[in-house]
């Protein structure tokens, strides 16, 4: 038998709660005005009965008037001392009305799955009474937004408040901390009190706590001297407040006795707390259990397709050159090479392109502006070539060594650009990238990356017969990768993982004699041998590329292909058809 499904207005429950709150306030005004009128009537009747003899006079003695200035001075001094302490326990929040929020769901770019979860959360929150009545369920009381910095957690919270039509109470976690005993917990109580008050006025409210780890850190990490208050006291107060969502006002309790009976069927106002952090592992476990934070939404860095959509969408909102579009080669390259960039970084990249176009005197953004902005955001601003002729040649040979191995070594990474322009502490750079985001790395990938790191030093040794200090950062990265190869990824002789080592522990393993040090040395030697084989076989191409770098100072992949020819081995790909399910392939 088919059942009729009731179509729910998405703002029905919030609006009904808001209208109920307005009706309650009107009834209270009626009660107050009625009481005032009764008092006036009683006063008039009393005066008639007592013969208008209620007044009395009072005169300050002349002797006491001499002490009035001193008394006033004492009052002012006390006020000066007490005034700074009056607001210590106030809620440090910033109230934002829904009409003042300037972001919407269309501004959340590059994360379709996150956008879908946010939309579901909005529907649950706006229909909380229907959800309870029909399915016996409730939307989450508190939600944790966790993920890397710049992934749009604050923006998503604002979108929820705007599309729900409720106030947004923004507060930083660190602003709850106070220097006086008990004031931190008092601020937390005041914050939740304001949330409940606004929820009764608007039918709902969204409380957002940014950098939640500043007040929600696990209590086991606190010292004994801090267990009385400090962070531990704030966490305890948060636990109490999050558990007391259904705290009823006296008006709501009166409904149970038949008072305000027209409102008995209306939904109670509801507020929701959203906390954001990029260090969820440090939060107290008691906060994360159901009943406190009922749901956790992870905000991920955008993948290659999401980065491309973000770039295209942001550029569509700006004045750009006619050749820039979804099929732009520059956008394709940046989308592939920008793995690890957050939504905020990509937004800043587009803004930086506009700044570069402004300084160049153009009236629109070009491909060159976008590429220059990308290099500035990811690699830093260029400081030119401040070194002398010989050092310039050494840097060119070093970077040409990295580029030569990337081009002829047969690795999976593609060459993006090679430069000898100084950026920060780096005297030059060779940028490589993968056409698609990668989530797994094989043993061969790690050895290939170690070989690529050694190639700059190997090229210097081949051309000049000695190496320079420019290889120090390469050796540091190669040693770190080799140590992870042996101790974390289980790719060495032992399957024991000691990945939770501190920096001091890793240093001890690399400096003391033992099987770990010997195996790490073997991995580094293997990577260096790979590099030496490639660099020695393509020594003429290395020298040719070094001389061109000295002239132009920066080359992209197209320039390298024009100089050295087409790359002999591209990105290696493996399809399902290449895998034999009955036998293990040695190529994988």
Image (spheres, rainbow, N blue to C red):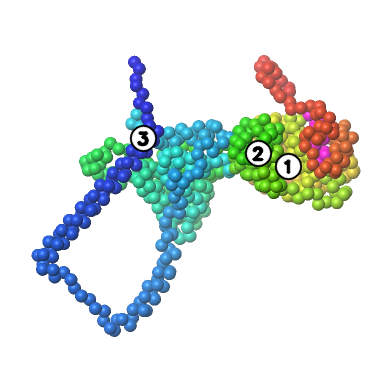
Label 2 to label 3: alpha-carbon separation: 43 Å
User: Which contiguous range is marked in magenta?
Assistant: 398-410
Is 404 colored magenta in this rendering? yes
- The residue tagged 1 is 477
Quick one: quadrant of the N terminus? top left
Dot 3 or dot 1, earlier in sequence:
3
Task: Please name the residue shown 54% across and 32% down the image.
Answer: 112
Q: Is residue 470 rendered to the left or right of residue 501?
A: right
Residue 47 percent across, percent down from the top left: 13, 65
- The residue tagged 3 is 12
Q: Residue 304: tell me if it is visible.
A: no
Task: Please name the residue shown 37% across and 79% down the image.
Answer: 70
| Mark 1 nearby-residue class (10 Å; few <14, some 14–19, many ≥20) | some
Quarter assignment of residue 512: top right
Q: Residue furthest bottom?
A: 63
- The dominant secondary structure in magenta is helix
Task: Please name the residue shown 88% across and 37% down the image.
Answer: 544
Mark 2, secondary structure of its residue? loop
- The residue tagged 2 is 320
Q: Is residue 302 rendered to the left or right of residue 79?
A: right
| Mark 2 nearby-residue class (10 Å; few <14, some 14–19, many ≥20) | some
Dot 2 or dot 3, earlier in sequence:
3
Q: Which residue is more in the foreground, 443 or 435?
A: 435
Dot 1 or dot 2, earlier in sequence:
2
Residue 381 percent across, percent down from the top left: 72, 48
Residue 85 percent across, percent down from the top left: 43, 63
**Location of residue 242 with respect to 124 vertically, above or below:** below
């Amino acid at each position: 038998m088919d059942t009729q499904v009731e179509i729910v207005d998405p703002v029905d429950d919030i609006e009904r709660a808001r209208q109920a709150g307005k009706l309650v306030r009107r009834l209270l005004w009626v009660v107050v005005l009625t009481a005032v009128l009764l008092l006036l009537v009683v006063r008039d009747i009393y005066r008639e009965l007592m013969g208008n003899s209620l007044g009395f006079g009072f005169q300050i003695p002349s002797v006491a008037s001499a002490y009035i200035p001193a008394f006033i001075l004492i009052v002012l001094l006390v006020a000066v001392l007490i005034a700074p302490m009056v607001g210590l326990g106030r809620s440090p929040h910033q109230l934002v009305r829904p009409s003042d929020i300037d972001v919407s769901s269309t501004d959340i770019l590059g994360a379709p799955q996150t956008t879908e979860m946010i939309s579901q959360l909005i529907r649950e929150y706006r229909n909380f009474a229907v959800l309870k009545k029909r399915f016996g369920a409730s939307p989450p009381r508190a939600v944790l937004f966790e993920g890397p910095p710049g992934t749009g957690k604050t923006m998503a919270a604002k979108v929820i408040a705007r599309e729900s039509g409720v106030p947004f109470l923004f507060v930083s976690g660190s602003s709850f901390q106070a220097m006086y005993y008990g004031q931190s917990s008092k601020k937390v109580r005041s914050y939740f009190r304001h949330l409940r008050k606004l929820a009764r006025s608007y039918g709902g409210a969204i409380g957002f706590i940014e950098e939640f780890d500043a007040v929600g850190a696990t209590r086991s990490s606190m010292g004994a001297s801090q267990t009385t208050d400090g962070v531990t006291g704030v966490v305890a107060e948060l636990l109490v407040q999050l558990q007391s969502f259904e705290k009823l006002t006296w008006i709501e309790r009166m409904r149970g006795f038949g008072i305000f009976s027209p409102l008995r069927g209306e939904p109670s106002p509801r507020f929701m707390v959203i906390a954001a952090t990029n260090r969820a592992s440090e939060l107290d476990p008691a906060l994360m259990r159901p009943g406190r934070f009922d749901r956790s939404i992870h905000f991920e860095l955008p993948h290659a397709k999401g980065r491309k959509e973000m770039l295209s969408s942001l550029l569509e909102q700006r004045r750009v050159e006619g050749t820039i579009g979804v099929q732009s080669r520059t956008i394709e390259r940046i989308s592939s090479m920008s793995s690890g960039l957050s939504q905020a970084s990509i937004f800043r990249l587009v803004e930086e392109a506009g700044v570069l176009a402004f300084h160049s005197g153009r009236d629109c953004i070009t491909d060159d502006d976008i590429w220059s902005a990308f290099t500035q955001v990811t690699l830093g601003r260029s400081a030119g070539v401040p070194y002398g002729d010989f050092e310039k040649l050494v840097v060119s040979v070093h970077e040409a060594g990295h580029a030569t191995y990337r081009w002829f070594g047969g690795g999976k990474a593609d060459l993006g650009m090679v430069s000898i322009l100084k950026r920060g502490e780096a005297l030059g750079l060779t940028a490589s990238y993968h056409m698609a985001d990668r989530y797994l790395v094989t043993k061969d990938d790690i050895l290939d990356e170690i070989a690529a790191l050694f190639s700059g030093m190997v090229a210097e040794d081949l051309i000049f017969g000695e190496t320079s200090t420019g290889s120090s950062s390469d050796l540091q990265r190669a040693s770190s990768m080799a140590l992870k190869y042996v101790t974390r990824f289980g790719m060495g002789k032992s399957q024991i993982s000691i990945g939770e080592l501190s920096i001091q522990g890793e240093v001890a393993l690399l400096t003391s004699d033992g099987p770990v040090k010997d195996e790490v040395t073997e991995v580094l030697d293997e990577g260096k041998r790979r590099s030496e084989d490639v660099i020695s076989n393509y020594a003429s191409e290395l020298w040719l590329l070094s001389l061109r770098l000295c002239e132009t100072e920066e080359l992209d992949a197209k320039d390298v292909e024009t100089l050295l020819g087409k790359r002999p081995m591209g990105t290696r790909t493996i399809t399902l058809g290449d895998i034999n399910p009955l036998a293990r392939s040695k190529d994988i």
